[in-house]
Image (tube, rainbow, N blue to C red):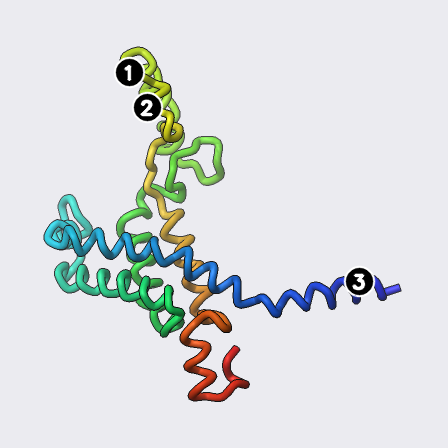
């Protein structure tokens, strides 16, 4: 009676031979995210330092120049390491810290949503108020602008700037911290296999 469920479970278990695809996908997804974030801070280093350090209109963080340099190192170095699958679990740590700091100091006051959508779960008052403002903006653009052209690259939205993206990236990095870079298509796998033996390279 259990023959069919057992066969299906056996078939499902065979897909584990491809389990390296999941961490590979997470790594490749995160590479451009981290690289662009790091490059933006590097190209606007002085502005980033000022934003990190200013308590009135910035984050009010201590040692802003050092914090900026560490964030740049974590994001650019992390992007390279994620691409190569090198020191993946180690690099996940500063990247998770960076995402946690971003979530708590930059995005938390705006709630969950990155893009304001009053119909979505966790919509706060700020998000709910955005619907009327967005509709008013659409009316103005329909009356005084080329609305079809303005929306030809995508619909108009309100950036809420909540913690959604930062937390999503943190969870992805947390997964990589525990699973590692994955088999076959990472330097971590081959280095571990070379120096610690094939049995440890999983």
In front of the other: label 1 or label 3?
A: 1
Q: Earlier in the sequence, mark 2 or mark 1?
A: 1
Local secondary structure at mark 1: loop
- For label 2, count other residues whose C-alpha is less than 10 Å away and answer few (under 14), some (14-19) or many (20+): few
Q: CA distance from mark 1 to mark 3?
A: 61 Å
Q: Which residue was labeled with disc 2?
A: 150
- Classify residue 4 as left or right of residue 76: right
- The x, y position of residue 127, in whole percent, is 38, 33
Residue at image point 44% right, 82% down: 192
**In terms of secondary structure, where does tag 2 sit?**
helix
In the rendered image, residue 4, in percent from the top left (x then y), is placed at: 83, 62
| Residue where numbered disc 1 is placed | 145
Left of 136 or right of it: where is 26? right
Q: Is residue 201 left or right of residue 125?
A: right
Looking at the image, which residue is at 40% across and 53% down?
Answer: 167
Q: Residue at x 21, y 65 (%)?
A: 70
The residue wearing badge 3 is 5
Q: How many other residues sit within 10 Å of disc 1, few (<14), some (14-19) or many (≥20)?
A: few
Q: Residue at x 15, y 51 (%)?
A: 44
Q: What is the quadrant of the N terminus in the image?
A: bottom right
Confirm whether residue 178 shows in the render.
Answer: no
Q: What is the quadrant of residue 73 in the picture? A: bottom left
């Amino acid at each position: 009676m259990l023959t069919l469920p057992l066969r299906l479970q056996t078939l499902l278990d065979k897909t584990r031979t491809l389990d390296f695809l999941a961490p590979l996908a997470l790594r490749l997804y995160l590479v451009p995210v981290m690289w662009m974030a790091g490059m933006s801070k590097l190209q606007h280093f002085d502005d980033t330092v000022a934003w990190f350090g200013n308590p009135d209109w910035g984050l009010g963080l201590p040692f802003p120049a050092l914090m900026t340099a560490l964030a740049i190192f974590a994001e650019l170095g992390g992007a390279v390491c994620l691409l190569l699958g090198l020191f993946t679990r180690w690099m996940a740590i500063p990247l998770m810290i960076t995402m946690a700091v971003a979530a708590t100091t930059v995005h938390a006051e705006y709630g969950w949503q990155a893009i304001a959508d009053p119909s979505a779960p966790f919509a706060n008052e700020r998000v709910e108020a955005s619907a009327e403002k967005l509709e008013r903006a659409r009316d103005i653009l329909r009356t005084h602008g080329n609305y079809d052209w303005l929306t030809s690259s995508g619909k108009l939205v309100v950036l809420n700037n909540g913690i959604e993206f930062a937390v999503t990236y943190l969870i992805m990095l947390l997964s990589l911290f525990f699973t590692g870079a994955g088999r076959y298509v990472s330097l971590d796998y081959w280095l571990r296999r070379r120096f610690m033996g094939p049995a440890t390279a999983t």
